[in-house]
Image: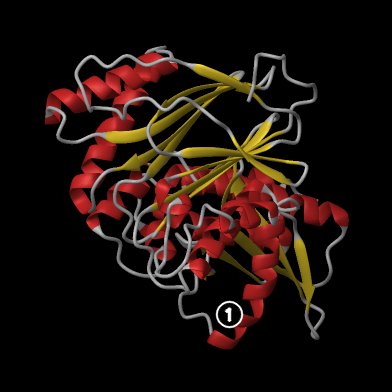
Protein backbone atom coordinates (compact mmCIF):
# COMPACT_ATOMS: atom_id res chain seq x y z
CA UNK A 1 0.00 0.00 0.00
CA UNK A 2 1.32 3.51 -0.78
CA UNK A 3 2.41 5.68 2.13
CA UNK A 4 -0.98 7.33 2.58
CA UNK A 5 -0.09 9.47 5.58
CA UNK A 6 3.13 10.66 3.93
CA UNK A 7 1.29 11.62 0.75
CA UNK A 8 -1.37 13.48 2.73
CA UNK A 9 1.25 15.20 4.90
CA UNK A 10 3.05 16.47 1.79
CA UNK A 11 -0.23 17.67 0.30
CA UNK A 12 -1.15 19.49 3.53
CA UNK A 13 2.24 21.21 3.76
CA UNK A 14 1.80 22.50 0.20
CA UNK A 15 -1.80 23.68 0.72
CA UNK A 16 -2.93 27.13 1.92
CA UNK A 17 -4.42 26.98 5.46
CA UNK A 18 -7.98 27.53 4.21
CA UNK A 19 -7.71 24.67 1.68
CA UNK A 20 -6.53 21.84 3.92
CA UNK A 21 -9.68 19.75 3.62
CA UNK A 22 -9.62 19.97 -0.17
CA UNK A 23 -5.93 19.00 -0.25
CA UNK A 24 -6.57 16.05 2.04
CA UNK A 25 -9.61 15.01 -0.02
CA UNK A 26 -7.60 14.94 -3.27
CA UNK A 27 -4.71 13.03 -1.70
CA UNK A 28 -6.93 10.45 0.01
CA UNK A 29 -8.91 9.83 -3.18
CA UNK A 30 -5.68 9.32 -5.09
CA UNK A 31 -3.79 7.14 -2.60
CA UNK A 32 -6.62 5.09 -1.07
CA UNK A 33 -8.97 4.99 -4.09
CA UNK A 34 -11.65 6.67 -1.98
CA UNK A 35 -14.82 7.83 -3.69
CA UNK A 36 -15.21 10.80 -1.37
CA UNK A 37 -14.29 12.25 2.01
CA UNK A 38 -15.89 14.64 4.46
CA UNK A 39 -14.58 16.53 7.45
CA UNK A 40 -16.96 17.17 10.34
CA UNK A 41 -16.01 19.67 13.06
CA UNK A 42 -17.47 19.87 16.56
CA UNK A 43 -19.36 23.00 17.50
CA UNK A 44 -18.57 25.13 20.55
CA UNK A 45 -21.00 23.28 22.80
CA UNK A 46 -20.18 19.79 21.45
CA UNK A 47 -23.85 19.39 20.50
CA UNK A 48 -23.13 18.18 16.96
CA UNK A 49 -20.65 17.61 14.15
CA UNK A 50 -20.88 19.83 11.08
CA UNK A 51 -19.57 19.34 7.52
CA UNK A 52 -16.77 21.53 6.16
CA UNK A 53 -16.49 20.34 2.55
CA UNK A 54 -20.15 19.94 1.67
CA UNK A 55 -22.23 22.50 3.54
CA UNK A 56 -25.23 21.50 1.44
CA UNK A 57 -24.97 17.85 2.49
CA UNK A 58 -28.53 16.50 2.06
CA UNK A 59 -30.30 16.54 5.39
CA UNK A 60 -31.24 12.87 5.29
CA UNK A 61 -27.68 11.73 4.61
CA UNK A 62 -26.31 14.19 7.12
CA UNK A 63 -28.57 12.99 9.90
CA UNK A 64 -27.90 9.36 9.00
CA UNK A 65 -24.15 9.79 9.38
CA UNK A 66 -24.36 12.02 12.46
CA UNK A 67 -25.00 9.06 14.77
CA UNK A 68 -22.04 7.09 13.43
CA UNK A 69 -19.79 10.13 13.37
CA UNK A 70 -20.81 11.03 16.92
CA UNK A 71 -19.99 7.50 18.08
CA UNK A 72 -16.52 7.86 16.57
CA UNK A 73 -16.09 11.30 18.15
CA UNK A 74 -17.13 10.12 21.61
CA UNK A 75 -15.14 6.87 21.60
CA UNK A 76 -12.12 8.32 19.75
CA UNK A 77 -11.97 5.05 17.81
CA UNK A 78 -12.49 4.29 14.09
CA UNK A 79 -16.05 3.24 13.21
CA UNK A 80 -16.92 1.36 10.00
CA UNK A 81 -20.33 1.70 8.36
CA UNK A 82 -20.99 -0.52 5.31
CA UNK A 83 -23.92 0.37 3.07
CA UNK A 84 -26.19 -1.85 1.02
CA UNK A 85 -24.10 -1.08 -2.08
CA UNK A 86 -21.03 -2.58 -0.41
CA UNK A 87 -19.26 0.73 -0.02
CA UNK A 88 -17.77 1.32 3.41
CA UNK A 89 -17.58 4.63 5.21
CA UNK A 90 -14.71 4.78 7.68
CA UNK A 91 -15.12 7.40 10.41
CA UNK A 92 -11.90 8.48 12.13
CA UNK A 93 -11.33 10.85 15.06
CA UNK A 94 -9.63 14.14 14.27
CA UNK A 95 -7.61 14.77 17.44
CA UNK A 96 -4.34 16.60 18.06
CA UNK A 97 -2.52 16.06 21.39
CA UNK A 98 -5.78 14.88 22.88
CA UNK A 99 -7.89 17.81 21.70
CA UNK A 100 -10.96 16.54 19.89
CA UNK A 101 -11.57 18.61 16.76
CA UNK A 102 -14.01 16.47 14.81
CA UNK A 103 -14.26 13.44 12.53
CA UNK A 104 -12.88 12.48 9.11
CA UNK A 105 -15.09 10.29 6.92
CA UNK A 106 -13.47 8.29 4.10
CA UNK A 107 -15.72 6.36 1.72
CA UNK A 108 -14.04 3.26 0.23
CA UNK A 109 -15.22 0.85 -2.49
CA UNK A 110 -15.43 -2.07 -0.05
CA UNK A 111 -14.68 -3.04 3.54
CA UNK A 112 -11.04 -2.18 4.32
CA UNK A 113 -8.48 -4.52 5.83
CA UNK A 114 -6.62 -3.69 9.04
CA UNK A 115 -3.71 -2.07 7.16
CA UNK A 116 -6.05 0.28 5.31
CA UNK A 117 -7.85 1.26 8.53
CA UNK A 118 -4.45 1.98 10.12
CA UNK A 119 -3.48 4.08 7.09
CA UNK A 120 -6.69 6.12 7.25
CA UNK A 121 -6.13 6.68 10.97
CA UNK A 122 -2.64 8.03 10.24
CA UNK A 123 -4.16 10.30 7.59
CA UNK A 124 -6.66 11.63 10.17
CA UNK A 125 -3.80 12.33 12.57
CA UNK A 126 -1.90 14.33 9.96
CA UNK A 127 -5.02 16.32 9.08
CA UNK A 128 -5.88 17.03 12.72
CA UNK A 129 -2.46 18.52 13.46
CA UNK A 130 -2.67 20.64 10.30
CA UNK A 131 -6.16 21.90 11.19
CA UNK A 132 -4.99 22.80 14.69
CA UNK A 133 -2.11 24.82 13.24
CA UNK A 134 -4.24 26.45 10.52
CA UNK A 135 -6.84 27.70 12.97
CA UNK A 136 -4.79 30.85 13.61
CA UNK A 137 -4.46 31.60 9.90
CA UNK A 138 -8.02 31.26 8.63
CA UNK A 139 -11.58 31.72 9.92
CA UNK A 140 -12.99 28.90 7.78
CA UNK A 141 -13.00 26.14 10.39
CA UNK A 142 -14.19 28.44 13.17
CA UNK A 143 -17.13 29.52 11.02
CA UNK A 144 -18.04 25.87 10.54
CA UNK A 145 -17.97 25.34 14.32
CA UNK A 146 -20.36 28.09 15.34
CA UNK A 147 -24.09 27.54 15.25
CA UNK A 148 -24.91 31.14 16.16
CA UNK A 149 -23.07 34.41 16.45
CA UNK A 150 -20.67 34.75 19.39
CA UNK A 151 -20.89 37.81 21.61
CA UNK A 152 -17.77 40.00 21.58
CA UNK A 153 -16.91 38.77 25.07
CA UNK A 154 -17.25 35.13 24.03
CA UNK A 155 -15.09 35.74 20.95
CA UNK A 156 -12.33 36.97 23.24
CA UNK A 157 -12.73 34.09 25.67
CA UNK A 158 -12.59 31.33 23.07
CA UNK A 159 -9.55 32.95 21.45
CA UNK A 160 -7.81 33.00 24.83
CA UNK A 161 -8.30 29.29 25.58
CA UNK A 162 -5.31 26.92 25.32
CA UNK A 163 -7.63 24.26 23.87
CA UNK A 164 -10.48 22.16 25.19
CA UNK A 165 -8.58 19.00 26.07
CA UNK A 166 -5.07 17.60 26.18
CA UNK A 167 -3.67 14.10 26.69
CA UNK A 168 -0.35 13.25 28.33
CA UNK A 169 1.25 9.99 29.42
CA UNK A 170 0.27 10.75 33.03
CA UNK A 171 -3.03 12.61 32.69
CA UNK A 172 -6.03 13.60 30.58
CA UNK A 173 -7.42 17.11 30.96
CA UNK A 174 -10.57 18.70 29.54
CA UNK A 175 -12.59 21.86 30.07
CA UNK A 176 -15.79 23.52 28.91
CA UNK A 177 -17.22 27.06 29.03
CA UNK A 178 -20.94 27.87 29.18
CA UNK A 179 -22.98 29.61 27.95
CA UNK A 180 -20.71 28.94 24.97
CA UNK A 181 -21.90 31.80 22.75
CA UNK A 182 -22.22 34.51 25.39
CA UNK A 183 -19.68 33.60 28.10
CA UNK A 184 -18.19 36.65 29.81
CA UNK A 185 -15.54 36.43 32.51
CA UNK A 186 -15.19 32.77 33.55
CA UNK A 187 -12.23 31.00 32.00
CA UNK A 188 -9.59 28.27 32.28
CA UNK A 189 -5.98 27.99 31.21
CA UNK A 190 -3.32 25.30 31.32
CA UNK A 191 0.23 24.51 30.30
CA UNK A 192 2.17 21.23 30.08
CA UNK A 193 5.90 21.50 30.73
CA UNK A 194 7.82 18.28 31.37
CA UNK A 195 6.74 16.81 34.70
CA UNK A 196 4.67 19.86 35.57
CA UNK A 197 1.08 20.65 34.64
CA UNK A 198 -0.26 24.10 35.54
CA UNK A 199 -4.04 24.68 35.55
CA UNK A 200 -5.89 27.88 36.42
CA UNK A 201 -9.63 28.46 36.65
CA UNK A 202 -10.94 32.02 36.84
CA UNK A 203 -14.32 33.18 38.06
CA UNK A 204 -14.36 36.57 36.36
CA UNK A 205 -16.40 39.33 37.99
CA UNK A 206 -19.09 41.15 36.04
CA UNK A 207 -20.59 40.53 32.63
CA UNK A 208 -19.90 41.05 28.98
CA UNK A 209 -16.93 42.77 27.41
CA UNK A 210 -15.67 44.37 30.63
CA UNK A 211 -15.49 40.97 32.35
CA UNK A 212 -13.79 39.37 29.33
CA UNK A 213 -11.20 42.16 29.19
CA UNK A 214 -10.41 41.78 32.89
CA UNK A 215 -10.03 38.02 32.47
CA UNK A 216 -7.75 38.48 29.44
CA UNK A 217 -5.45 40.77 31.43
CA UNK A 218 -5.39 38.29 34.34
CA UNK A 219 -4.63 35.25 32.17
CA UNK A 220 -1.87 37.03 30.27
CA UNK A 221 -0.28 38.31 33.48
CA UNK A 222 -0.16 34.76 34.86
CA UNK A 223 1.19 33.47 31.55
CA UNK A 224 3.86 36.16 31.57
CA UNK A 225 5.07 35.06 35.00
CA UNK A 226 4.82 31.36 34.17
CA UNK A 227 6.68 31.69 30.86
CA UNK A 228 9.42 33.59 32.66
CA UNK A 229 9.88 30.66 35.03
CA UNK A 230 7.76 32.10 37.85
CA UNK A 231 6.24 29.90 40.55
CA UNK A 232 2.52 29.68 41.33
CA UNK A 233 2.97 32.40 43.94
CA UNK A 234 4.73 34.67 41.46
CA UNK A 235 1.99 34.07 38.90
CA UNK A 236 -0.72 34.99 41.39
CA UNK A 237 1.13 38.03 42.72
CA UNK A 238 2.00 39.49 39.30
CA UNK A 239 -1.60 39.08 38.15
CA UNK A 240 -2.93 40.58 41.39
CA UNK A 241 -0.64 43.60 41.19
CA UNK A 242 -1.45 44.12 37.50
CA UNK A 243 -5.17 44.15 38.18
CA UNK A 244 -4.89 46.34 41.28
CA UNK A 245 -2.76 49.04 39.67
CA UNK A 246 -5.14 49.16 36.71
CA UNK A 247 -8.38 49.25 38.74
CA UNK A 248 -7.27 50.29 42.26
CA UNK A 249 -9.27 47.56 43.95
CA UNK A 250 -12.56 48.25 42.20
CA UNK A 251 -12.22 45.08 40.11
CA UNK A 252 -10.83 41.71 41.13
CA UNK A 253 -10.77 38.11 39.90
CA UNK A 254 -11.40 34.97 41.97
CA UNK A 255 -8.86 32.41 40.77
CA UNK A 256 -7.65 28.92 41.63
CA UNK A 257 -4.10 28.06 40.53
CA UNK A 258 -2.97 24.41 40.54
CA UNK A 259 0.35 22.81 39.70
CA UNK A 260 0.54 19.02 39.42
CA UNK A 261 3.83 17.16 39.82
CA UNK A 262 3.20 14.30 37.39
CA UNK A 263 5.85 12.06 38.90
CA UNK A 264 4.65 12.13 42.49
CA UNK A 265 0.99 13.07 42.25
CA UNK A 266 1.46 16.14 44.42
CA UNK A 267 -0.72 19.16 43.69
CA UNK A 268 0.39 22.63 44.79
CA UNK A 269 -2.42 25.16 45.00
CA UNK A 270 -3.02 28.88 45.44
CA UNK A 271 -6.67 29.45 46.29
CA UNK A 272 -7.42 33.10 45.50
CA UNK A 273 -11.18 33.06 45.50
CA UNK A 274 -14.22 31.02 44.65
CA UNK A 275 -13.48 28.18 42.15
CA UNK A 276 -13.82 24.83 43.93
CA UNK A 277 -11.90 21.58 43.44
CA UNK A 278 -13.53 18.19 44.09
CA UNK A 279 -12.07 14.71 43.91
CA UNK A 280 -13.84 11.64 42.52
CA UNK A 281 -12.26 8.49 43.96
CA UNK A 282 -13.89 5.07 44.05
CA UNK A 283 -17.36 6.48 43.38
CA UNK A 284 -17.16 9.08 46.18
CA UNK A 285 -17.03 12.83 45.51
CA UNK A 286 -15.08 14.76 48.14
CA UNK A 287 -14.37 18.51 48.25
CA UNK A 288 -10.68 19.39 48.60
CA UNK A 289 -10.51 21.85 51.48
CA UNK A 290 -8.14 24.73 50.85
CA UNK A 291 -7.58 27.93 52.79
CA UNK A 292 -9.19 30.64 50.71
CA UNK A 293 -7.09 33.76 50.19
CA UNK A 294 -7.93 37.16 48.71
CA UNK A 295 -9.08 37.35 45.07
CA UNK A 296 -6.50 38.73 42.66
CA UNK A 297 -6.43 42.52 42.47
CA UNK A 298 -8.34 43.35 45.65
CA UNK A 299 -5.42 45.05 47.44
CA UNK A 300 -1.93 46.26 46.56
CA UNK A 301 1.08 44.00 47.13
CA UNK A 302 -1.06 41.04 48.27
CA UNK A 303 1.04 37.99 49.14
CA UNK A 304 -0.11 34.43 48.59
CA UNK A 305 0.75 31.07 50.17
CA UNK A 306 0.93 27.65 48.55
CA UNK A 307 -0.93 24.63 49.92
CA UNK A 308 -0.49 21.00 48.90
CA UNK A 309 -2.63 17.90 48.53
CA UNK A 310 -2.07 14.54 46.85
CA UNK A 311 -3.78 12.49 44.19
CA UNK A 312 -3.66 8.75 43.70
CA UNK A 313 -3.59 6.83 40.40
CA UNK A 314 -7.11 6.79 38.99
CA UNK A 315 -8.23 9.94 40.81
CA UNK A 316 -10.39 12.43 38.94
CA UNK A 317 -10.37 16.11 39.91
CA UNK A 318 -13.13 18.51 38.95
CA UNK A 319 -12.60 22.27 39.19
CA UNK A 320 -15.79 24.32 38.90
CA UNK A 321 -16.64 28.01 39.01
CA UNK A 322 -19.43 29.41 41.16
CA UNK A 323 -21.67 29.45 38.09
CA UNK A 324 -21.72 25.67 38.52
CA UNK A 325 -21.77 24.87 42.23
CA UNK A 326 -23.73 27.97 43.31
CA UNK A 327 -26.29 27.84 40.47
CA UNK A 328 -29.70 28.18 42.12
CA UNK A 329 -32.72 27.98 39.80
CA UNK A 330 -35.94 29.34 41.26
CA UNK A 331 -37.33 27.06 43.95
CA UNK A 332 -34.35 24.68 43.96
CA UNK A 333 -31.33 24.26 46.21
CA UNK A 334 -27.93 25.20 44.76
CA UNK A 335 -26.66 22.73 42.15
CA UNK A 336 -23.58 22.10 44.28
CA UNK A 337 -25.54 20.84 47.29
CA UNK A 338 -26.30 17.38 45.91
CA UNK A 339 -27.03 17.38 42.17
CA UNK A 340 -23.47 18.27 41.16
CA UNK A 341 -21.98 15.31 43.05
CA UNK A 342 -24.54 12.98 41.45
CA UNK A 343 -23.56 14.26 38.02
CA UNK A 344 -19.87 13.79 38.78
CA UNK A 345 -20.38 10.24 40.07
CA UNK A 346 -22.22 9.38 36.87
CA UNK A 347 -19.07 10.13 34.85
CA UNK A 348 -17.02 7.30 36.41
CA UNK A 349 -16.88 5.28 33.20
CA UNK A 350 -16.51 8.26 30.88
CA UNK A 351 -13.25 9.83 29.71
CA UNK A 352 -12.54 13.35 30.99
CA UNK A 353 -13.50 14.79 27.59
CA UNK A 354 -17.02 13.39 27.98
CA UNK A 355 -17.25 14.03 31.73
CA UNK A 356 -17.16 17.84 31.41
CA UNK A 357 -20.06 17.66 28.98
CA UNK A 358 -22.05 15.42 31.30
CA UNK A 359 -21.71 17.82 34.23
CA UNK A 360 -22.66 20.76 32.00
CA UNK A 361 -25.67 18.95 30.52
CA UNK A 362 -26.89 18.06 34.02
CA UNK A 363 -26.44 21.72 35.00
CA UNK A 364 -28.59 22.81 32.04
CA UNK A 365 -31.18 20.17 32.94
CA UNK A 366 -31.19 21.45 36.53
CA UNK A 367 -32.12 24.85 35.09
CA UNK A 368 -34.90 23.11 33.13
CA UNK A 369 -32.83 23.93 30.01
CA UNK A 370 -33.32 27.65 30.57
CA UNK A 371 -30.36 29.95 29.91
CA UNK A 372 -27.74 29.87 32.65
CA UNK A 373 -27.86 32.93 34.88
CA UNK A 374 -24.10 32.99 35.32
CA UNK A 375 -21.02 31.90 33.41
CA UNK A 376 -19.95 28.36 34.19
CA UNK A 377 -16.63 26.51 33.88
CA UNK A 378 -15.96 22.81 34.40
CA UNK A 379 -12.42 21.41 34.18
CA UNK A 380 -11.78 17.68 34.62
CA UNK A 381 -8.35 16.18 35.30
CA UNK A 382 -7.69 12.42 35.36
CA UNK A 383 -4.33 11.45 36.86
CA UNK A 384 -3.08 8.08 35.64
CA UNK A 385 0.17 7.88 37.63
CA UNK A 386 1.45 4.39 38.33
CA UNK A 387 2.53 4.82 41.95
CA UNK A 388 0.95 6.38 45.05
CA UNK A 389 1.90 9.95 45.82
CA UNK A 390 4.20 10.80 48.68
CA UNK A 391 2.42 11.54 51.93
CA UNK A 392 2.52 15.32 52.18
CA UNK A 393 -0.55 15.85 54.27
CA UNK A 394 -3.21 15.81 51.55
CA UNK A 395 -6.71 16.52 52.71
Task: Give how far across and how far down residue 382 sits, in percent.
Answer: 66, 38
- Name which residue lies at 70% across and 65% down: 71
Residue 302 placement: quadrant: top left
| Residue 272 in view | yes
| Residue at the disc numbered 1 | 62
Q: Nearer the viewer, residue 313 or 275?
A: 275
Task: Give how far across and how far down residue 21 sits, in percent.
Answer: 51, 59
Task: Give how far across and how far down residue 83 sits, in percent.
Answer: 78, 81
Q: What's the image's color scheme?
A: secondary structure
Classify residue 43 as left or right of residue 120: left
Residue 148 placement: quadrant: bottom left
Say if 374 sits above or below 56 in the image: above
- Name which residue lies at 61% across and 60% down: 103
Label 1's element? helix
- Name which residue lies at 79% across and 84% down: 85
Task: Give how far across and how far down residue 201 sits, in percent.
Answer: 43, 37
Classify residue 387 as left or right of residue 378: right
- Name which residue lies at 50% across and 27% down: 290
Q: How many marks?
A: 1
The crowding category of the residue bearing disc 1, from other C-alpha atoms within 10 Å (few below 14, some 14 to 19, many at least 20), is: some
Classify residue 310 as left or right of residue 373: right
Q: Quadrant of the C terminus?
A: top right
| Residue 51 in view | no
Q: Nearer the viewer, residue 63 or 344?
A: 344
Classify residue 224 as left or right of residue 367: left
Say if 291 sits above or below 3 in the image: above
Amino acid sequence: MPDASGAVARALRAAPPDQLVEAADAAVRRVLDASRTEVFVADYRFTGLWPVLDKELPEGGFLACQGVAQRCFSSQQPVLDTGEDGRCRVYLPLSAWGERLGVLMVELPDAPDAATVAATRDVAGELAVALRAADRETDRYRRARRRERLSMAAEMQWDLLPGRSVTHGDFVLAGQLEPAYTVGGDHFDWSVDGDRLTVTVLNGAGNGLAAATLTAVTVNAMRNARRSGGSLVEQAELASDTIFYQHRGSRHVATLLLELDNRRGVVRAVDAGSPHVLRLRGGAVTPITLEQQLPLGMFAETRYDVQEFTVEPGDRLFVVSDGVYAAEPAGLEPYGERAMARAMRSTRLQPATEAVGTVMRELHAYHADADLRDDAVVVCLDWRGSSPADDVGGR
